[in-house]
Amino acid sequence: MAIDLFPHGAAVPDGLTRRALSFLWIHCVRVPPGDIRSHRESWLAHGVPAREIDRAEAYSARWGGLVLPPSRHFEGGPKVLDSDFPEGSPEEGWWIPAGPVRCSVNFGFLIGPDGEFGVHGIRWTPLHATVEGWIEAQALDQHASRWARKVTRLSGDAVDELDLTGFERVPEVAGLADDWWRGPDSLVAVLGGEAEYYGEPRDRTAYVYAGLPPHALRD
């Protein structure tokens, strides 16, 4: 089932929180995705397994053409969600392109063998366990920025000193290298993806969104 949110009739998949759906409605558009099916025979001829082409088709059908606002990190995130020629080999496994980059960078956004959303270039760094997790994180960042009375940015060793006693992980974000935590009146984003990808601990970053009203802490 899909929910029709956009004026031109494009549909947004279900399975997202109300917050994420509101984010998509207000801040996103969806354009016609690429036609993955027309490339199937060519990709098979180049040695791409049929199951990986199926994954690319499924991703394009579910997310293709979705344009999100620029994300806070990784140079704004994908320009538009859509798939292309799968990358990998039988020995390494296969990754599905998640969407083109916004500018010239040394990584690409990919969907991992187990459905993780992450970046690949220097090394494979899964950021969220699902594509939905990436979208939920972008929605949560916008939401927390709107309602917080105070936002504090921490970096490097200061991130390790964060006291998250009494906080719980935000499950819908499906965090891996990047994650979110919810407290009594605040939200905390702990973003280790760039540090892990570049091998630079000083790139660890956290944002503390404090002073949120009770309704802003719900989904």
Image (spheres, rainbow, N blue to C red):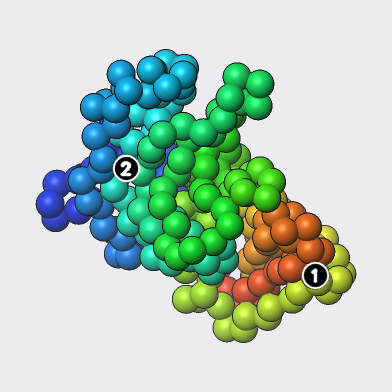
Q: Nearer the viewer, residue 201 or 84?
A: 84
Using residue 147 as the reference point, say whether residue 8 is left or right of it.
left
Pick the quarter of the image with the N terminus: top left
Kindly indicate the quadrant of the structure image that contains residue 209: bottom right
The tag on residue 202 is: 1
Which class describes the residues within 10 Å of circle 2: few (<14), some (14-19), or many (20+)?
Answer: many
- SS of the residue at dot 1? helix
- SS of the residue at dot 2? loop
In this rendering, does residue 103 appear at all? Answer: yes
The x and y percentages for residue 197 are 70, 54
Kindly indicate the quadrant of the structure image that contains residue 57: top left
Using residue 109 as the reference point, say whether residue 163 is left or right of it.
right
The x and y percentages for residue 46 are 42, 22
Q: Amino acid at mark 2?
A: Gly
Q: Give above or below for 209 relative to 39.
A: below
Q: Residue furthest front?
A: 46
Which residue occupies 38% across, 39% down?
83
Which residue occupies 85% across, 65% down?
160
Q: Are marks 1 and 2 in contact (CB under 8 Å)?
A: no
Q: Nearer the viewer, residue 166 or 120?
A: 120
Query: Real-space Cα distance between discs 1 and 2?
Result: 35 Å
Q: Amino acid at mark 1?
A: Arg
The x and y percentages for residue 168 are 71, 53
In this rendering, does residue 139 appear at all? Answer: no
Q: Earlier in the sequence, mark 1 or mark 2?
A: 2
Mark count: 2
Which residue occupies 68% across, 60% down?
194
The tag on residue 57 is: none
Which residue, given by chain and number where applicable, does mark 2 sit on?
64
Q: Give above or below for 126 relative to 57.
A: below
The x and y percentages for residue 137 are 53, 56
Which residue occupies 14% across, 46% down?
9
